[in-house]
Amino acid sequence: MRHLVFLAPGRVEWQDAPEPAVGGALEAVVEPVAVATCDLDVAILRGTFRAFPGQFPLGHEGVARVTDVGDAVASVSPGDLVVVPFQISCGTCRACQAGRTGNCQSVALGSMYGYEPFGGPWGGFLADKVRVPYADAMLVRLAPAIDPAAVASLSDNVADAWRTVGPPLAEAPGSEVLIVGGAGGSVPLYAIQQALALGAPAVPRAARARGGRAPPSGTRHLTGGGLGDRGGSPVRSAEETGPDALAVKAGQPKPGHASGGHLRGILLVTTAGGDGS
């Protein structure tokens, strides 16, 4: 088969690779049908993020069609369209049972598709076929009416955005949400869309998305100084929504950083890696 390999910033190449096969009762093999580009992929390709030097297979967000399953797989069958999470998880260890699937104890810490060797020898989604070691725990069946291309990022960035707004809005339904910046281009936009879908009446945004993309309808773009500047700052504008407004930091300022606090009566919720979710 072939897979797409990152060589260096600005350079990728299709290369031959051994075709994966089911090697155990819990496994499955899938063929990707729609693959999304993660914000991190873009930074790597542009050379602005160099933590993972080449060469390695690319792609860790996507929808695939199941082609083969092991004898013990019960949740999916050949022909099913599935979302494939980017992290490898068994679903049965203590960490997985607690919802921390990114810290699965059955595989090496940080195991994921793409970014070899850091993520392990799992290959990438930009390939003819991909092996899934724990099919029942990992694969999520897709309803036939859903366009795979529309949800290809459910593997990673869409879920990252949801965890910034979903739980806070469940605790404070109907609150306005302030999206504060965001290191990536897509996660803040997904967070805005999901906040609106979850009933937020307005979603002010304190930083423009990169690449010239316009925020979704319902977004109020706020301009002015920093958080400590009363003259047109996001905090000052957000105060007008009342004490129940939620301010969400959609991004990861530092690996492992997570904090919560209040800015002039506005609940600030920040999310980042490090919790393994």
Image: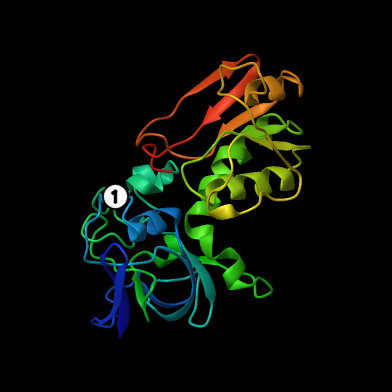
Residue at the image point whose x is 59% and y is 43% from the top? 208
Q: Position of residue 117 (x, y in %)?
A: 20, 59
Asked if residue 22 shows in the view, the reply is: no
Q: Position of residue 125 (x, y in %)?
A: 39, 70
| Residue 217 placement, left or right of 67 | right
Numbered circles on residues, count: 1
The picture quadrant where one finds residue 12 is: bottom left
Q: Amino acid at mark 1?
A: Gly
Give the quarter of the figure containing the N terminus. Answer: bottom left
Q: Position of residue 238 (x, y in %)?
A: 70, 24
Residue at the image point whose x is 75% and y is 49% from the top? 217
Decide: is 129 above or below 253.
below
Give the quarter of the figure containing the C terminus. Answer: top left
| Residue 36 placement, left or right of 14 | right
Decide: is 135 above or below 70.
above
Q: SS for tag 1?
A: loop
Residue that mark 1 sits on: 110
Crowdedness near tag 1: few (<14), some (14–19) or many (≥20) residues, C-alpha within 10 Å:
some
Residue at the image point whose x is 60% and y is 49% from the top? 189
**Residue toward you, 242 or 91:** 242
Residue at the image point whose x is 41% and y is 67% from the top? 135
**Residue toward you, 135 or 145:** 145
Give the image's coloring scheme. Answer: rainbow
The picture quadrant where one finds residue 236 is: top right
Q: Position of residue 194 (x, y in %)?
A: 66, 47
**Residue toward you, 187 or 212:** 212
**Residue toward you, 186 or 68:** 186
Asked if residue 78 shows in the view, the reply is: yes
Decide: is 86 above or below 221.
below
Decide: is 109 above or below 82.
above
